[in-house]
Amino acid sequence: MDSRAIDSLEKIRQQYDQAPYPRVPLETSPKRNYELLYKYSLVTPYYLRYQTVIDPKGKLILDAGCGTGFNALILAEANPGAQIVGVDISDASIQLADQRLKFHGFETAEFHVLSIEDLSQLDRQFDYINCDETLYLLPDPIAGLEAMKAVLKPDGIIRFNLHSALQRRHFYRSQALFKRLGVLNDGQTDEAVQAVVNTMQRLRPDTTMRATAWKSEWEQTEHRGQILVNHLLLGDKGYTIPDLFAMLDAADLEFISMVNWRHWDVTDLFKDPENLPAVWAMSLESASIAERLRLYELLHPIHRLLDCWCGHLDQIDPGLLLDEWTDTEWQTAQVHLHPQLHQDEVKQDLITCIAESQSFEISRYIPLPALGPVMVQSALAATLLPLWDGPQSVMSLVERHLMTQPRDPVTLEPITKEAAFMQVKRLLAQLNSFLYILLERC
């Protein structure tokens, strides 16, 4: 690492020693934030890649750039029984992270003052590496990816993200402005924060900088952290989808999925996804995943983070896609509820909906879809109830459906087993597309 890169890392270290991040109160727990736990669960990306439901117990999980440990706490809650290891270059942040995990009862979590480039010093191989809000700060992000890849198990998965150059373009202008004024060079001091506040307060409201890169509530002391992570963030850099895939290629890593994959479908941006303009229908027919994501980014750059999962090249072939399964494969499959929906609160909500003959809004707990809620019709809701007791075979759910809905509500004719199977199959396929339920071939 050259002297310029070393100097850059030292300034970043000082930045986080002065203002450890994230600024989440020690007692705050993510236990009831099912959407957040869903994203940090190893089960989610592992199923996307291997179509297998993994048990996180005993797995080794690294939080690379752990900061004050809130993400490490989410990882611990989302992956019961896993061993959590955190690294960060800020000693002040590491102390807070260790205190946080112990406060919440995770005594075995361990933390080290260590840069991502030096992960090999841990002399361990990890099942999952979470690198959240960190890689874009490194002088050489590709070197960071390569360092994580070197300590990743063959079937392991990395989550990393980059700041979007398009979504954050106004903040990059702001950083350039305050760097030119000498404010950003002073680090994240109270004086630097006040200089930003004074500037924004005294600008005319129609000034582009104030209109696009400022919120009046940031003037309040409790919200000034937003100034630190937007206007005064040292080392901050923006990237595009082509940059992300170029990094993966350079590090010999394979793209798995965007973390918020349901919010990256370019066809959702059209009024009628089934009736696209001819030029779009032709282009998307042969477009790669990277090309489709780039089109979304150009049309609708709303995502602050380009957030993805990746892994080693040429790993296990997950086999047939769900829409390629035969009826025999469906009939012998096992159905799992995603662990982050396996909560008493969710179960009681389902039971209430069944008792009151109401549709069950399963997306209320993990609101993934971009186009509205995911509802399970009351006639089918009772079919799902056994999943809260554990995995079920598809055919056991079909048998339950026949008991709860023995007759067609229109004709009053008995529902055949074949018809019940098709109804349950459609329901499970819909819920599997959001990973609310996970299907395993036996």
Image: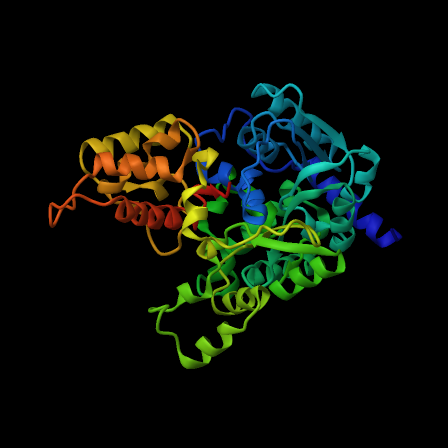
- Coloring scheme of the render? rainbow
102 up-or-down from 53: above or below: above
Asked whether 387 or 69 is in front, the reply is 387
Q: Residue furthest bottom?
A: 278
Q: Residue furthest left?
A: 411
Asked whether 239 or 205 is in front, the reply is 239
Name the spot of residue 56 as percent of width and height, x first: 59, 31
212 up-or-down from 92: above or below: below
Asked whether 356 or 391 is in front, the reply is 391
Q: Quick check: 379 left or right of 237?
A: left
Q: Residue at x 31, y 50 (%)?
A: 422
How many marks do you count on the picture? 0
Q: Residue furthest right?
A: 2
112 up-or-down from 193: above or below: above
Residue 234 can be seen, yes or no? no
Name the spot of residue 90 as percent of width and height, x first: 73, 35
Q: Quick check: 143 left or right of 398?
A: right
Q: Quadrant of residue 95?
A: top right
Name the spot of residue 297 as percent of width and height, x first: 53, 65
Residue 9 can be seen, yes or no? yes
Q: Residue at x 49, y 72 (%)?
A: 284
Name the spot of residue 269 as percent of width and height, x first: 41, 66
